[in-house]
Structure formats: structure tokens, C-alpha cells
Image (cartoon, rainbow, N blue to C red):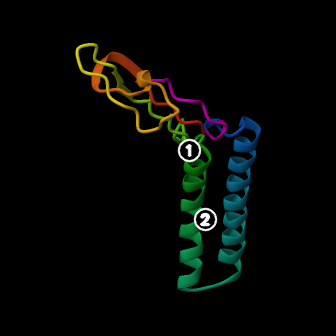
Amino acid sequence: MSEPVPSITSAPEPLAVDQARRTRSYLIQMSIRVVCIIGAVLVDGWLRWALVAAAVVLPYSAVLVANAGRERTTHETSPVTPAAAPALTELSVPDPAAPPTTPADPGSSPAATYTTPGPARVIDHVDD
């Protein structure tokens, strides 16, 4: 079998792009936390406690998301399947012991008429 062909789609995301995505995600979550803290100071009742709880939980989740690391996606390495090898077929050769036959085409030679299969092999080849 032939070896798989490498694909450009299997290349990982550049490190700078990955770091920018993770930093942006962390900053968005920390911005939401700041809004929760300011909201907890301004409102009263059950909403205050919900905003305090969100402000406490958000740093943990933000760090988990930011440290999740690079995505490891796998792609098929060879989207093109190799063509099958050409088939070998038997080639008929004239039988020296058989009586000669008359060719169907009067312009062809008697050697062009094959009567029995012989040991020779021919590769069937189809041009693409």
C-alpha cells in the first residue's frame, strides 16, 4: 500500500492565533465579572446574591477555559484514494497443434487468429 498523502488541513492552528483567542475569552469573562460586582453593589434582594455568586464562580471558569489549551483536531490525511492497480489478463496465442483457421477479415493474416490461451500476460491499461 502507498503511504498517506499529507494534507495542509492537518496543520495545527498557529500559536499566536490560539493565544489571542484564549486571551479574548478570558477578558470577556472577567468583564462580565466586573459588571456582576458593580451590579451587586447597585441592586438589592435576591438579584444581589445571584450577582455575587456569579462574580465568585466566573474567575474559576475563566481560568479553566483559558488554560484549556490548543484544540487538537484530526483530519483525514489523504482525501484522495489511490487508483487500483491495473488487472492482469491472459493473452491468447496461436496453438501450433491446432489446424489453421481462416481469419474473418480477408485482409488480416492467419497469425492474427488466436485459438487457445497461452502463458503470456498483458496488462489492461486505461488512459485517464
Q: Give the answer, above or below, for where 21 lies relative to 46.
A: above
Element at badge 2?
A: helix
Q: Residue at x 69, y 77 (%)?
A: 39
Relative vertical location of residue 37 with respect to residue 82 in this rendering, above or below: below
* Nearer the observer, 82 or 29: 82
Give how far across and how far down residue 116 sits, in percent.
27, 24
Which label's residue is closer to the chain start, 1 or 2?
2
**Is residue 7 in the magenta section?**
yes
| Residue 80 appears left or right of 25 | left
Quadrant assignment, res 11: top right
User: Please, what is the three-letter code of the amino acid marked with disc 1?
Assistant: Ala
Q: Residue at x 55, y 53 (%)?
A: 60
> Image point 73% across, 63% down: which residue?
31
Residue 110: image location, x then y, percent: 41, 24
Choose between 82 and 90: the one closer to the eye.
90
Residue at horizontal 46%, vertical 30%?
Answer: 124
- Which residue occupies the foreground of this view, 63 or 127? 127
Q: Is residue 90 magenta?
A: no
Q: Position of residue 72 (x, y in %)?
A: 54, 40
Q: Residue furthest left?
A: 97
On the image, numbered disc 2 is attached to which residue?
A: 55
Looking at the picture, which amino acid does disc 2 mark?
Ala
- Read off the residue under disc 1: 68
Instruction: Name the dominant secondary structure of the magenta segment.
Output: loop
Q: Which residues are magenta?
A: 1-9
